Structure formats: C-alpha cells, structure tokens
Amino acid sequence: MEMLVFGHGYSAGYLTPLLTARGWRVTGTTRGDTDRVAAAGAQPVLWPGSEDAVRAAIGRADAMLISAAPTDGGDPVLAAFRDDLARARPRWIGYLSTTGVYGDRQGGWVDEDSVLDGSGPRGQARIRAEAAWQALAREQDLPLHIFRLAGIYGPGRGPFQKVRDGTARRIIKPGQVFSRIHVEDIAKVLLASITAPAPGGIYNLCDDDPAPPQEVIEHAARLLGLPVPPAIPFEQAQMSPMARSFYADSKRVRNDRIKRDLGVSLRYPDYRSGLAALLQAEDPASHCQPRRPVH
C-alpha cells in the first residue's frame, strides 16, 4: 500500500512510522526539508519543483493525506493537481482542516454538524478549501474524509521551553477557552480512519478537556517546579497579529464522533496527561509529579 502526503510536516511525521510499521510505503512532499521527511520514514519529493514525480505518486497512491494549508489563491494541491486527482482512484483521502472553521462561540460547544462561521481570513480560507475538496469528491466519487484539528502540541511543541527560558506568559482573557490535541492522538485517529474508510466523514480532533490557555502554562510551570508566570490582561499583552488572532475565537469542541465511529480511545485525553508524558520523555527519571515551585 502507498500513501502520498501533501505537505509532510509535524503531524504526518507521527503518522508515517505507524504506516511503515504496517508495510506501507509513504511519499511526502516538502518545500525543502527533505532530511526531516526522510527521518520520519517517508520518501521526500520536492514540491514545488518535482511536479512529474508528484503526478506519478498520485497515480500510485492507495491513500492521500492533504496537510498543505490554503493560500490566498485557494488550495494549492487542487490548483496544481486537480486533473490528476480527478483521475486517481485511492481508497482513502484525508484533508487536515482546523476547528477554526467554527469561528467564535463565546465558550460554547460545537460539533461536526455546527454551522461553519470561521472568523478572519484563515478560518474563511479553510471553509472554502473544505468546500472545494468536497465538490471534487462529489464530482469524481473520491473517498474524502475531513479532519478538523484543534491546537496541536507534542514533542518540541509544548510550553516547557518557554517556561524554562522565562518567555511564557499567562494572558488572561475572561471566558477564553481552547481545545487541544496531542500529535500522537492525531496519528492514532488518522490510522483508524485509513483502516476503516467512511467516505464523506468529518471528524473533530481534540481532547476531552477544553481549557483556558493560562491554566496550561501554570500547570507546566508547576510540573517543572518553576515560578508561575505572572498574569497579563489580554488588553495589555504585547502580541503579534497572528498570536492575537487565536484569541478571537473561544469555543469548546466535541470529539464524540472519533470515539463512536472510529473506536478511538485517546492516549492523552487532557493537557495534564499530555504534558506529563512530554516531561517524562525529556527526563525518564522524572515521575512528572508537580514539584515545589521556586520563589
């Protein structure tokens, strides 16, 4: 079996070893970081730059994962390879989207049937990209599955380094909550879907515990035994436009469908178990119990 990944990045880096362990061959496109793709166990292909090789991989693929983000011009994979995709006959296609398509719900709950109301240009671009892939799937009878990912964390993408170097901040915006997902659980859900395709399926990928961002920073500091960063009101925080945009949306995301339809049991159902595992991986001698804070 062959998997083609468009945009072989962080999440695909955890799915690829699961597939290769089951005998799959994985090809991953990259803009230039071929060493990282190869280290995950995939065959790297430069794109843009090697369009013929990508077209050949499309023709061979039993499954395809689209992890490339939309641009101002729309979905880059559809723009470059729509005709090739229309001729392809994979048994599974996965599109990695974002829970940002739901927009701001002022802390309320959303599920896969909620109205899409993405706030800002990035959320709207994802809504358009999902619709474009769904249109192609309907026209060509392609087995499309959409995965809406919450905030991703995992090895190398946790709060510990910022807490250690003193750059972590507890930004307080009353009522603000985010949903999260550990990268290993992303790979677990994708593998479950690949194993039992359900064309047309849409799934939220998040854990069971939406939480305010300042709680995560505080918990990370206590695990490390370091001072809890001071609270900063959102209105006074110095933030990039990108960082500030994340605080425009506050919602709680339901994940019942991945459990019910895919039979997935999350390895890290909340940020506490996820952070404990990250710290344990850094320091196997640690039992990841909160340490006495340093004052």
Image (spheres, helix red, strand yellow):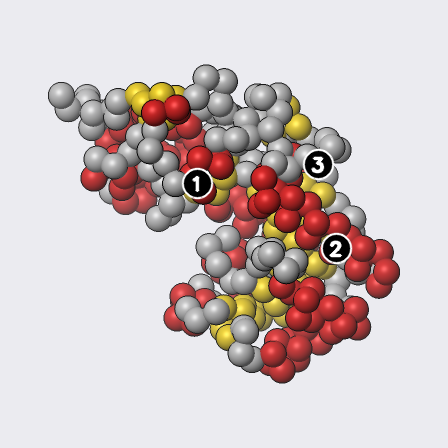
Name the amino acid type tagged 2.
Ala
Q: In this view, does 146 lie above or below 89?
A: above
Task: Mark 2 vs mark 1: give the one in front.
Answer: 1
- Give the position of the N terminus as an image quadrant: bottom right
Disc 1 on helix, strand or loop?
A: helix
Label 3 sits on residue: 116
Residue 282 horizontal/vertical position (percent): 28, 44
Residue on which the image places disc 1: 241
The reply to whether the C-beta atoms of the residues labelled 3 and 2 are less than 8 Å apart is no
CA distance separating discs 1 and 3? 23 Å
SS assignment at label 2: helix
Instruction: Please state if 190 lies on the left or on the right of 241 as rendered.
Output: right
Q: Which class describes the residues within 10 Å of circle 2: few (<14), some (14-19), or many (20+)? A: some
Q: Nearer the viewer, residue 254 or 167?
A: 167
Residue where numbered disc 2 is placed: 132
Q: Residue at x 61, y 51 (%)?
A: 96
Where residue 170 sits, quadrant-wise, is top left
Q: In which quarter of the image is residue 55?
A: bottom right
